[in-house]
Image (spheres, helix red, strand yellow):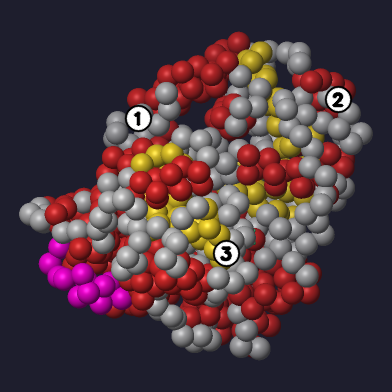
Amino acid sequence: MNELVSLEFHDGVAVITISNPPVNALSPGVPEGILSSIQSAAGDPAVKAIVVIGARRTFIAGADIREFGKVVSGEKPRRSLLPLLREIEDCPKPVVMAIHGTAFGGGLEVAMAGHYRVLAGSAQVGQPEVKLGIIPGAAGTQRLPRLAGVAKAVEMCAFGQPVGAVEANASGIADAIIEGDLLAGGIAFAREAAARPHTKTREREEKLLGTDPVIFERAREQAAKTRRGQAAPLAAIEAVEAATRLSFDEGCAREAELFDRCLYSTQSKALIHAFFAERAVSKIPDVSQETAVQEIRRAAVVGAGTMGGGITMNYANAGIPVTVKETTQEALDRGMANIRKNYASSVKKGKLSQAEMERRLALIAPQLTYDGFDQADIIAEAVFEGMTLKKQVFAEIDGIAKRGCIFASNTSYLDIDEIGSVTRRPELVVGHHYFSPANIMRLLEIVRGRATSREVLATSMALAKRLGKIGVLAGNARGFIGNRMLTPYLREAQFLLEEGASVEDVNNALYDFGIAMGPLAMSDLAGLDVGWRARREFKHLEKPGVRVPLVADRLAEMGRFGQKTGRGWSKYDENRHASPDPEVAALIEQTARKAGIERRAIGRDEIVDRTIFALVNEGAHLLGEGIALRAADIDVVYLNGYGFPAWRGGPMFYADTIGLKTVVNRIEEFRKHHGDELWQAAPLLRRLAESGSSFGEFDRQKQAAAGV
Ligand code: 3H9
């Protein structure tokens, strides 16, 4: 008992309540409080049974993740939870865990040490540690297979997905689902349990017997495919496997070894960084938490193309009625057919019910006019990328929209201020830059124009959350954060081709680094016509005499637009499988020779360093210019919008792990070979490297200065 854990008595039942907002994590003091409460209740002859419950929104959401950072930096030794769990399990009186919200990680481990678990219907339980690059470290891999069976335990520990109350009940993790008041139900359950003998989870062996080793083989194959490059899922499988071969205590010892190995790895530091970065990103220093957030009851979208259709779906998915406008019936029909096709495919995969699909479709009003746009609280513009067209649309909607309506442009490169200049309400103009496919990708860049109001930014952040997105604030620079960094990344990928690497060399080196798709494969997916069009729009900004990639425009001129035309940097079959195209290899070689570029053998390290350090250096420019608020924001952009591997933490975190001095030295080598115009370490990067600092430290100091 302490200020985090309280003990009360309800007529023979002791109720232990954990109260450590926001999510009742097992921060220092919580395990101690549970232990002393269990001991008091166990020693009190008036107590027949014990209920453990969480205050407010949830049961225990796990160990306090902030503590892991301290462990890794050596600040504080880790205290094991195992003795507490054994004390709970050895308690002579039945301990009933009453679970609502989430019992995750250490929370589920505490719950499994109880003799019974009763769940609210909306509760979820899980061992999501692998998402942080670690494995359960308090016997989760040993108790879960004893309750849920080995196959379910492997699935939950290695892949981290939670299960709901019904599944938890069916699999043996839960003993009952409580309708109505959880505490009252838990107490009633505990009273009945007091009359029966109870078993300790660690002594339940029946579900371990006769385990089929194929379970582990299959899980390893699945991990290799879906968790490419990650160590924790394999460690989790090994730990559960140990439960089937070793005694409980030996299994716990094996788990502890594997846990420590994971905890001290760079992968877990990177994933923990990503966890906190995703939660910090919505905090904007000059937009206080008290800023008024406008309620979005109705939305309208201009354009039902690929992006407009996806944006429309986002609103409908969040239950917001949305009007979508196109200029021709044909385009409108095509757009709606795509939306229906996307929903139908989710229904087919079992991710959506037919009734839910119909409900969402009913929220969408397709039309050729601006009728009803005067009712919208937000109008999202998703027409072709061109300044003249965007300005025309903004001028039109300015004449129709109601007062206070937010205008959000989905531009991916253009100047938000210039777009907004044609309206009488620049303070309501903002960029909402979605990533394709817009209904799936989690990233939303929220672009702040010169006049964008704080209320519009706060509303945009809240809306992003409601739409299931992660909103990241970006300044109004060409390409904002993600696409501006992409330009030097793709430039280097193409230069490497001209200098002698093959399309496959470049794609494979970055795929093996962990990126979801190599840069040229990504360009083929996005469409080579997109960059071609953008380059024409910005041709006037090219500096004369500075080397530019030579082949991409040639491919686009040949009608090789990538996957959609079956040919781009690679050839694609009807199933969109890529194969090398000798015609492209010849074109690259010919073009390079004609331009006098020396061809040579290029290794994987050079491919990775030139492309990734180009990203990092541009990221440092963006930070220095204030276009990105924090290095961690840039990481969130790349993790959620560009397939950067989460276990590397994002480009800026990756640079910190390499050491900024090393990064600057490498950039210096590139500068010597390729010239000052292409390679100059960004001033901020140079400054941090010279002072032995890091992007992480830069963020911490900036946060501290802003008082966030
Ligand atoms: C573990 O348990 C290892 C064990 O095996 C033991 C080994 C010995 N710690 O996500 P939200 C904060 S590993 C500290 O926005 P939601 C979060 O940073 C752990 N802080 O809310 C945020 O703070 P702020 C296994 C935590 O409703 C605030 O709570 N457990 C923790 O969308 C709200 O979070 C997990 O991996 C934590 N464990 O989602 C669970 N969790 O307001 C991780 C949250 O300052 N957490 N915070 O930005 C989650 O999945 C979600 O946070 C949860 C709530 C579903 C709980």
Q: Residue at x 44, y 81 (%)?
A: 78
Most extreme residue toward the right, as rendered? 424
Q: Earlier in the sequence, mark 2 or mark 3?
A: 3
Q: Which labelled disc corresponds to residue 6?
A: 3
The quadrant of the picture occupied by the N terminus is bottom right
Q: Are marks 3 and 1 in contact (CB under 8 Å)?
A: no
Residue that numbered label 2 is attached to: 402
Residue at point 66%, 88% (across, down): 691
Residue 94 point in image, percent of width and height: 35, 58
Indicate which disc residue 349 carries: 1
Q: Quadrant of residue 318?
A: top right
185 left or right of 92 in image: right
- Mark 3 or mark 1, earlier in chain: 3
Q: Is residue 508 left or right of residue 401?
A: left
Residue type, mark 3 in image? Ser
Q: Residues within 10 Å of mark 2 (few under 14, many from 20)?
A: some
Does label 3 point to a residue whose CB lies under 8 Å from ligand 1?
no
